Image (spheres, rainbow, N blue to C red):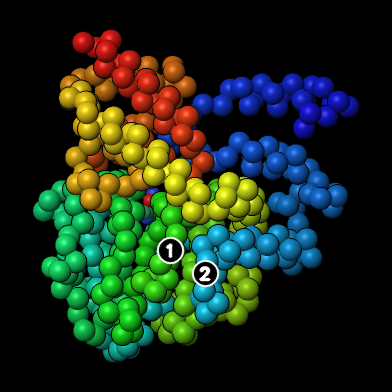
Amino acid sequence: MNDPQNPALAAMMQRAVAERVYNFSPGPAALPAEVLQQAAEEMLSWHGSGVSVMEMSHRSREFESILAQAEADLRELLQVPKDYRILFLQGGAIGENAIVPLNLMRRLDAERPKADFVVTGTWSVKTEQEARRYGEVNIAASSVEQKFVRIPDVADWKLADDSAYLHLCTNETIVGVEFQEVPEVGQKHGRVVVADVSSHILSRPVDWSRLQVVYGGAQKNIGPAGVTIVIVREDLLGHAHPLCPSAFNWRLAAEHGSMYNTPPTYAIYIAGLVFQWLKRQGGVPAVEQRNIAKAKALYDFLDQSAFYRNEIDPSCRSRMNVPFFLADESRNEAFLAQARAAGLVQLKGHKSVGGMRASIYNAMPLEGVMALIDFMREFERSAA
Ligand code: PMP
């Protein structure tokens, strides 16, 4: 974009880059500036094709190459085993709350479909409630009584013997709890575990011996809203309810290479650019180390302060979403306004929780977290 032929455009790009702030949005969330710049450069004509990716047929050779590359890169980044299929669908994670039961719940018993749910926050509540429309829901464990501050101990989970799958939300975006590992609960003997990984996909490796289906919306760690990633072990395809919409039937989607209907092409293209960016960062292990450092810096700061607090049990604090409260809540508005003025945006907590929340996904650099901590220290000092 620093095209000497077009100094006006180059100046516009420079100004836009200078205007960028540290964006702590929970989603749709910050994307790497490098990716946005590349998309801007390729916007009018992708790789000499003369058209934007938005204007291409999804059946064109060009788009097929974009999709194939994105899928191969995602497979490499997450070390997805050969017998798992990667699907790029629509419908979002809330769509999957219906699509998962429609595809899986009848797997063991079509007459009495049943699934287990471990409820660890707002999102898993939504998931089990939607599933009730399709079959029997067994709440194997729930931390609702503890206001979701810790994940129930696996020894206390009451799993049914005849459920088609167990559902977990492995990072609860709103309350800020994250499974540090998925426990062994009989996967070795055929139990199927499904996880909503919307808000921490690609922030850490996936243990595929413990997860047979993962899904998530893209708008936190991957790209624009509109594409939903589903990664499913092959033998789990083909159990869909007869009334499952064809566009959401995983077997059909897999058979058609995610092209049973028109996929969200531009969102897939941006996701592909993010996958390439992640590979340049050193892949998931390198990004995980950065995420650990970012989260540690912020939680350590919160823990030493009497002015701010995080209420989540340290054993299951999310590396991605860090909710916190000011001891004096009457200062909330001033905190947000001054943060905004300092170039730190979207820090307001979810309305169901209140307080603040810093979402620090892969695209948030350590410098952004340090800038937030510096601001918080200064705000505390000036309030004294
Ligand atoms: N699950 C989780 C963990 C989420 O964070 C979200 C969105 N914040 C959803 C589900 C819902 O996703 P969508 O709006 O894409 O349907």
Whether residue 298 sits left or right of residue 264 in the image: it is left
Measuring 49% from the left and 35% from the top, which residue is drawn there? 365
Name the mark on residue 206.
1
Say if 88 sits above or below 288 in the image.
below
Q: If the image is split into quadrants, where does the N terminus sit?
A: top right
Say if 232 sits above or below 66 in the image.
below
Q: CA distance from mark 1 to mark 2?
A: 8 Å
Kindly indicate the quadrant of the structure image that contains residue 379. Answer: top left
Tell me the crowding category of disc 1: few under 14, some 14 to 19, or many 20 or more residues within 10 angstroms, Cα based: some
Is residue 213 at least partly visible in the picture? no
Q: Earlier in the sequence, mark 1 or mark 2?
A: 2
Q: If the image is split into quadrants, where does the C terminus sit?
A: top left
Q: Amino acid at mark 2?
A: Val
Name the mark on residue 97.
none
Question: Contact, CB < 8 Å: mark 1 with mark 2?
Answer: yes
Quick one: which residue is furthest to the left in this view?
Answer: 145
Is residue 120 at least partly visible in the picture? yes
SS assignment at label 1: loop
Say if 199 sits above or below 342 in the image.
below
The residue carrying mark 2 has its beta carbon less than 8 Å from ligand 1: no
Measuring 60% from the left and 80% from the top, which residue is drawn there? 255
Q: x, y (%) of residue 25? A: 43, 37
Q: x, y (%) of residue 200? A: 41, 52
Q: x, y (%) of residue 173? A: 34, 48
Measuring 41% from the left and 51% from the top, which residue is drawn there? 199
Residue denoted by label 2: 80
SS assignment at label 2: loop
Whether residue 12 sits left or right of residue 272 in the image: it is right
Tell me the crowding category of disc 2: few under 14, some 14 to 19, or many 20 or more residues within 10 angstroms, Cα based: many
Measuring 19% from the left and 66% from the top, which residue is drawn there? 154
